[in-house]
Image (cartoon, grey):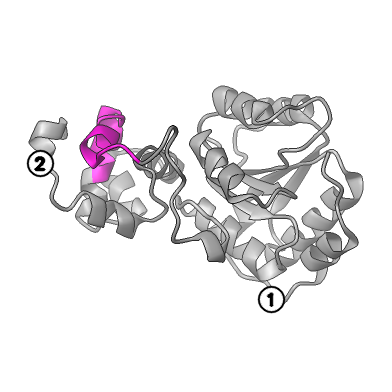
Amino acid sequence: MIAMTACAVSDFGHGSGGAVPLAGESALRLLVVDDHPLFREALASAIALAFPKAELHEADGIGAACEILSRDSAIDLTLLDLSMQGVTGFEGLDTIRARFPRVPILIVSGVTEPRIMGEALRHGAAGFVPKAVDKATLTRAISEVLGGALFMPPDLATAPAPARGGDKAPIAERVARLTPQQMRVLGMIRQGKLNKQIAYELQVGDSTVKAHVSEILRKLEVISRTQIVIETAYLDFDQAGGGF
């Protein structure tokens, strides 16, 4: 496990920025997964300051995290450390993603290598923040991921996750990875519709739309709705299978 510095603890507990209310905050449920008790406590404390009405759960490993997620289907977000005992590479992330695909995962890790951050998004993470970020950045990361966006540290926000084996595939190939329902959501994003509007038209819950948006961002290898619109602006959706 990567050693956590005292700086990382103090940054989360006492970083700049006050509490940021979030719509529906009273129902917000977050799960913190980290095998380091001191950091887990510091992270939980920082979250409580930013989202005072949120319900926090803690797990010291992947097994415990899966038990909590199995018991509580209303968990809105999992904050996961990549480097824990008994976990190699992205095994923990892959396990939670496979068993609970609708729960977004924000990686909070001591790893700061851009390649690892990009690869985490490839494995289905909805965002990545280093453990030493200030509380304001952590709060923004949580809020953006809960809103259905992907989050990367500000200094890497303009660099999409690298594609496996080289440059990204052509946009038509990336769009072809989407499911029919994700294609419908993509079409509505291109029309400028908000998540609530999309949920209403598709007659699904907001959380389902957020999950679809996160998957669209990941599969298209972009990090924002604006990038979605730009990259698909000249795409013929009839040829791509969208049927819009």
- Secondary structure that dominates the magenta span: helix
Residue 11 appearing in the image: yes
Rendered-image quadrant of the N terminus: top right
- The magenta stretch is 168-186
Mark 1: amino acid: Gly
Is 166 colored magenta in this rendering?
A: no
- Figure quadrant of residue 180: top left
Give the residue at mark 1.
18
Mark 2: amino acid: Asp
Give the class, few, some or many, for how many residues have Cα within 10 Å of label 1's Cα (few <14, many ≥20).
few
Residue at 69% x, 55% y: name it: 130
Q: Secondary structure at mark 2?
A: loop
Q: Is residue 147 left or right of residue 11?
A: left
Foreground residue, 19 or 168? 168
Comparing labels 1 and 2, the label whose residue is closer to the camera: 2
Residue 23 appearing in the image: no
- Residue 49, given in percent of the width and then of the height, sits at 75, 66
Is 180 colored magenta in this rendering?
A: yes
Residue at 55% x, 65% y: name it: 155
Foreground residue, 240 or 50? 240
- Residue 39, given in percent of the width and then of the height, sits at 85, 51
Residue at 55% x, 59% y: name it: 143
Give the residue at mark 2.
236
Q: Is residue 37 above or below residue 182?
A: below
- Figure quadrant of residue 191: bottom left
